Image (cartoon, helix red, strand yellow):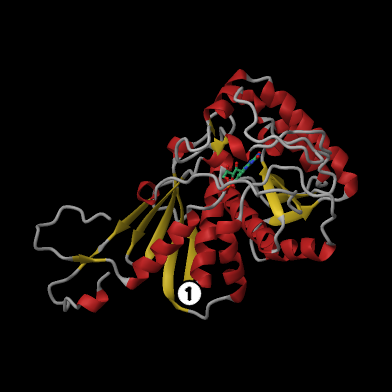
Amino acid sequence: MSANAHDSATKFRIGATCQELTRAALAAIHAPSVLNTQPWRWRITHDTALLYADQTRRLTVMDPTGRLLVISCGGALHHACVTLAADGVDFEVEPFPGAGDPDLLAVVRYRGVADPSAWAQRLYHAIRARRTDRRPFAGQPVPQEFVDRLCQAAQRTRAHLHMTWARDITDLALAAGQASEALMSDPAYRAELAAWVRRPGEGHDGVPLDTLAPLGTRPVPMRDFTATGLGWGATSRIDLSDREARYGVVVTDGDSPPDWLAAGVTLSAVLLAATSQHLATSPMSDLVEHEVARRTLRRMLGGVGYPAVGVRIGWPGPGEPPPPSPRRPAAEVIQVVADEIKDTEPDTPGKSA
Ligand SMILES: Cc1cc2nc3c(=O)[nH]c(=O)nc-3n(C[C@H](O)[C@H](O)[C@H](O)COP(=O)(O)O)c2cc1C
């Protein structure tokens, strides 16, 4: 909490509105982010929650333009909005309000009370259950009606979900191969990746070793974390073929920061909708990190739109789900600015938090 410079007689309170917004920002801590960088900051004042990009946490090699950073922040924004809607709060979101600060990504304004949304409540319950599951998925196909619900979730957002078909696997595999070749041959990339992989229990960010999985021979290769030199946290005797995985690509109309923010919202909507149906997911951004691979995906999309991030979807494999990845302490990412109580206002204890 911040109370700025005031004399000791000045009184402050955190009102109910501010508490609702803080609860939303707390839920947003659990959003996925590229290499678990959690590159966001929230500032909550009275009836607004301001979402900022934290450029100090940008991956300078993997993400020079900040696209993955903003997508990650879009996921946090969506998590916050789901929480408000589930709690019965009416609100509006203004993306990129300007105000001279390019890192101010969105303002969420409290507008009053609404009927809690059943849809949002389902997604809200998925927030804590969701994990990036890098294990090969089980050998059962995902029925089309489940995929349709993911598309419906994406339709409520501004970016698009392109679910690929079997015929697209060749292009996806080509893009993954091109990405791997370009990225792994870059020592700066390997060093950055290694710097963000953590031993279990180490730190509040980064990708814990025990959430990684053997690569196996998959139809679409996944990001190769072996560059870290730390070895796998988990070994597996399960079928590594991953042949029933489905792949989606979040696609935007343009390729600018507001589009990236929208892509993050869509990614989060798809991930939470999948989790609420007990499907496992893992985002795949290596497919779009290198221009050559991204061009391959664009061609696969018929040149329409800009691929922002991929997502792998399927039934979880046998065994325990991956452990949760750590999160930064709330005090590091959320600043709550208390309201000053005016002299004319009665200091009603029931109104204070
Ligand atoms: C924009 C974005 C890109 C990501 N790219 C990858 C990726 O290429 N490979 C991967 O294994 N996970 C990827 N992830 C998943 C993150 O590594 C994961 O969200 C983070 O480690 C936190 O773990 P959790 O999702 O289990 O909470 C990505 C997530 C986001 C939001």
Q: Is residue 305 visible?
A: no
Tell which of 77 and 87 is nearer to you: 87
> Is residue 16 positioned above or below 59 on the image?
below
- Percent from the top left, x then y, of residue 329? 40, 47
Left or right for 187, reference 19: right
Q: Is residue 118 visible?
A: yes
The quarter of the picture where residue 19 lies is: bottom left
Tell me what residue is drawn at x 56 percent, y 59 percent. Answer: 127
At mark 1, the secondary structure is strand
The quarter of the picture where residue 285 lies is: top right
> Is residue 189 positioned above or below 336 on the image?
above
The residue under label 1 is which amino acid type?
Asp
Tell me what residue is drawn at x 86 percent, y 45 percent. Answer: 168
Tell which of 112 and 303 is nearer to you: 112
- Percent from the top left, x then y, of residue 101? 40, 47
Tell me what residue is drawn at x 57 percent, y 38 percent. Answer: 35
Q: How many marks?
A: 1
Quadrant location, the N terminus: bottom left
Quadrant location, the C terminus: bottom left
Left or right for 244, reference 193: right
Q: Quadrant of ligand 1?
A: top right
The crowding category of the residue bearing disc 1, from other C-alpha atoms within 10 Å (few below 14, some 14 to 19, many at least 20), is some
Tell me what residue is drawn at x 64 percent, y 37 percent. Answer: 212
Residue hosting label 1: 90
